[in-house]
Amino acid sequence: MNAVEAVDLYKKFGDVVAVNGVSLKVDEGEIFGFLGPNGAGKTTTIRMLTGILRPDRGEARIMGYDVYREPVKARMSLGVVPEEANPYPDLSAWDNLTLVGRLYGLPRRTVEERALSLLTLLGLNDARGRKAKNLSKGMRQKLLVAMALIGEPKVLFLDEPTAGLDVLSARKIRSLILDLRKKGVTILLTTHNVEEAGSLCDRIAIINNGRIVETGSPDDLRIKSELYTYVSVTFDREVEEDAKQFFNAWEHRIQNSRLLIICREPAAPIVKVVEYAKVKGLNIVDIHTSPPSFEEIFVKVIGG
Amino acid sequence: MMKTGGNSLTHLWRSVWSICWKDIKIYYAKGPIVVTGVLFPLFLWAAFYMGRGLEFKEGLASLITLTVFFTSSSVTPIIAPWETRQRTLEMLLSRPVTVTTILAGDILASTIFGLIFTSPIVISGVILGIVPNNVLLAVAVIVLIAAGFSSLGVLFSALPTDTPADVVLLSSAVKLPLIFISGVLTPLAQLPPWLLVISVASPLTYFTDLLRWLYASGAFFPAVTDLVATVVFTSAFTAGALKLHKKTLSARLQRR
């Protein structure tokens, strides 16, 4: 069973088509990235997947439950950190958290146990009595994450979970995401931080102008993007002039003892480097590859 | 694994009560709201009844209606637009609750608020020896009226805006005429015929008349007519509020 399934979601606001036939399937236990530029249709898609917004056409399921026909059952399995949402500013962190816990139908004792454990995990326990409006942006974001987790969801939608967080807090959230995946939680991650998506996600869908334009694992997307990988080699001695002929199948540069090969697929040039070193009696001091950054891939896919 | 509320009824009740508790904590437990809830209906009532030589018994039904009306319908109109602006509504809607559950919580909080302010007036009447002829029915009617006016407030808030002032303007434009065309401030028997015809359009007419019957202070319509009209208005406000909120939700979310 797919943890999240969307079939042909379509939504129009006035004359503007916000989402145009989006279909996607997220497997259980997967971290699925959902990327796109501003106004691409990410938030509208997420709102339709959570059942807040009804599509003009299409279907969506969370853990097998139709989010429009059985919204409560679908959302019982779901935790959400919506991008465009806040905790209640006039309620304390504790009250916000226990309020959401009760909305999952949990008994008071269970809610309080989980709230305490989440506040401790996210380093918010000392601020539990502070009103949300008096928390820093980072603390508020962590509170929203705690509110998404209090129902112990099987599926988690995280819309910009690390936006505005300092480096340490962002790392904590990323580490939490990976821990949750280990526990079998399915995560749909929306972020503008494409490098974060590239490093965390098992698969990624890129949406642009309301349509999904590419889906695949980060490696698949790298290959599909046809962007170049750099193979950088340092030998123990200067490279001779005849190396140019040896590596002429690829664009390359030679500078003293260093060789830089620009290729789409690094395996063949690496074999050639080893062969060249053997023939010339050189030792390889350092060799490494630099695949294209995920930001480059993203820009290429959306046609930027 | 996931520990939940056991069954859907328990879950529903916990959700409704949590939203009610949230509303009371955020919106109702505030000094200015409390003062307005007490003073406004009291002054309006006093302005019409004092100096007319009427007995307290004759004006009690009107005072109760005005108090329930102003307290129960005072805050509900602004909750949805305010929460749209604060971006807390979307946070709430993404949890396992429906729009109906959220509105039920809002109506419950407002009903409780109305009853808290109405109770001292009813009790004062009892202390002065003014007791309704059927106490249980009186309590049921006051609860029904409070729920009805709370629903009316929720109905106003279906306007898909994130500006509370828009809704306050709309609700004042409807609520004040509803008072003046009803028999709240002047007994129906004393109204000119043309105003009597208009007064049947105001729910307050029946609520007040029913309370006048309960307090034996000169009802105009038969009690059954008042009771049926009260139930119909309350049901219509509640059903209308639910339907309109569901219809305008998409436009509301687009405001943010």
Image: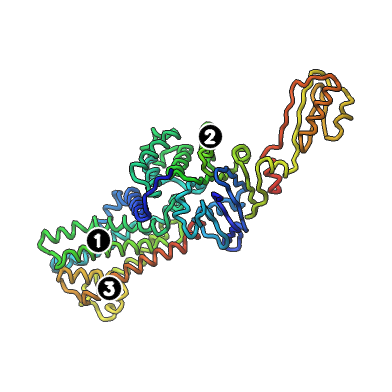
Residue visible at 45% across and 62% down in the picture = B246
User: How much space separates mark 2 and mark 3, taking CA atoms?
Assistant: 61 Å
Tell me, for residue B67, which label it has, or none.
Answer: 1
Q: Which residue is mark 2?
A: A175
Which amino acid type is shown beneath numbered disc 3? Val
Judge whether B182 appears above or below A304 on screen.
Answer: below
Q: Between residues B219 and B139, which one lies in front from this camera angle?
A: B139
Name the side, left or right, on which A243 lies relative to B17: right
Residue B131, horizontal then vertical, whole percent: 13, 64
- Which element carries disc 3, helix, strand or loop? helix
User: How much space separates mark 1 and mark 3, taking CA atoms?
Assistant: 22 Å
Q: Between residues B181 and A24, which one lies in front from this camera angle?
A: A24
What subunit carries mark 2? A
Q: Mark 1 or mark 3: which comes first in sequence? A: 1
Quadrant in which residue A115 is drawn:
top left
Q: Nearer the viewer, mark 2 or mark 3?
A: 2
Residue visible at 23% across and 77% down in the picture = B191
Residue visible at 29% across and 72% down in the picture = B181
Q: Are marks 1 and 3 in contact (CB under 8 Å)?
A: no
Q: Which residue is mark 3?
A: B228
Residue neighbourhood size for the residue with mark 2, other residues' Cα within 10 Å, grouped as few (<14), some (14–19), many (≥20):
few
Residue B128, horizontal then vertical, whole percent: 10, 61
What subunit carries mark 3? B
Q: Nearer the viewer, mark 1 or mark 3?
A: 3
Q: Nearer the viewer, mark 1 or mark 2?
A: 2
What is the tally of numbered marks visible in this picture? 3
Q: Are marks 2 and 3 on the same chain?
A: no
Which amino acid type is shown beneath numbered disc 1? Thr
User: How much space separates mark 1 and mark 2, taking CA atoms?
Assistant: 55 Å
